[in-house]
Amino acid sequence: TWQTMVDPHCDTYASLVRYAEGVCRAVGIKYGFAHVELMSRYDEKKNKFVDPVMVEVGARLAGGRKAIMAGLTVPGWRPFDAMVDAHCGVPVRVPAGFTPSKVALQVYVPSTKNGKLVSVEGNDFDRLNTHDSSIMLVKVGDQVKRARDLMSFCAYVWLIGSKEDVEADAKKARDEFVVNVEEEEPDSP
């Protein structure tokens, strides 16, 4: 599981951008920033995402490190300055080419087991070439559960770089992360 920024000008995502803009208009977001989370499916034949469904909309920047990551991937973009300008009625300064020059990815690193955390391997995420930052959400001695939602993951890792390098590092971050636990009874389905 991960989240990434996409180029809003890319034809593959155009229908999602239009949908998100329509959601903002429908709920009355006129000034400042909006954060829209949605789900859709990718249609191979059409080479685009279709059937979007809104999950969340808010008159704010995206949470977590997403705005920080956006500023690091789009040359000349300063999302926090732009947010203040927009709320003060100042025209937002958008870089001429608002296309990300790098890929940013937030990787959710799971536990696959339930129990008391005895040790962790592979949590030296700075070994990854595209590592920007990371946080461990658990420590030895904590009770961990098999990851099922955002707050049940053991770690978050933020990566920035080329698409290929980021995807390779995301796979390493998840595949090489091992939790050793004193196991409990498995969850029932």
Image: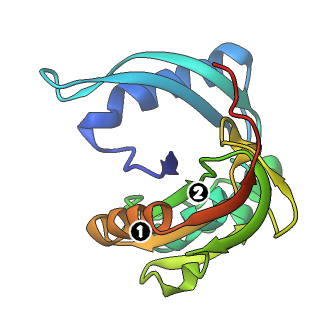
Instruction: Name the residue nearer the viewer: 94 or 36.
Output: 36
Labelled disc at residue 172:
1
Instruction: Name the residue nearer the viewer: 70 or 132.
Output: 132
The vertical placement of 182 against 159, above or below, is: above
Marks 1/2 in contact by CB < 8 Å: the verdict is no
Indicate the secondary structure of the residue bearing disc 2. Answer: strand
Indicate the secondary structure of the residue bearing disc 1. Answer: helix
Q: Residues within 10 Å of mark 2 (few under 14, many from 20)?
A: many
Q: CA distance from mark 1 to mark 2?
A: 10 Å
Labelled disc at residue 95:
none
Q: Measured from the top left, where is residue 142 in percent x and y? A: 87, 59
Examine the rendering and report whether any part of residue 64 can be seen: no
Which residue is pictured at 63% across the width and 57% down the height?
A: 66
* Location of residue 133 by image quarter: bottom right
Say left or right for 10 vs 66. left
Q: Residues within 10 Å of mark 1 (few under 14, many from 20)?
A: some
Say left or right for 62 vs 105. right
Quadrant that contains the C terminus: top right
Q: Residue furthest left?
A: 45
Identified by mark 1, the residue type is Lys
Identified by mark 2, the residue type is Val
Q: Measured from the top left, where is residue 41 in percent x and y? A: 36, 22
Q: Measured from the top left, where is residue 107 in percent x and y? A: 54, 57
Looking at the rendered structure, the number of numbered marks drawn on it comes to 2
Which residue is pictured at 77% across the width and 62% down the height?
A: 117
Instruction: Name the residue nearer the viewer: 46 or 142.
Output: 142
Say left or right for 96 vs 189. left
Which residue is pictured at 69% across the width and 47% down the height?
A: 62
Q: Earlier in the sequence, mark 1 or mark 2?
A: 2
The vertical placement of 140 against 45, above or below, is: below
Labelled disc at residue 109:
2
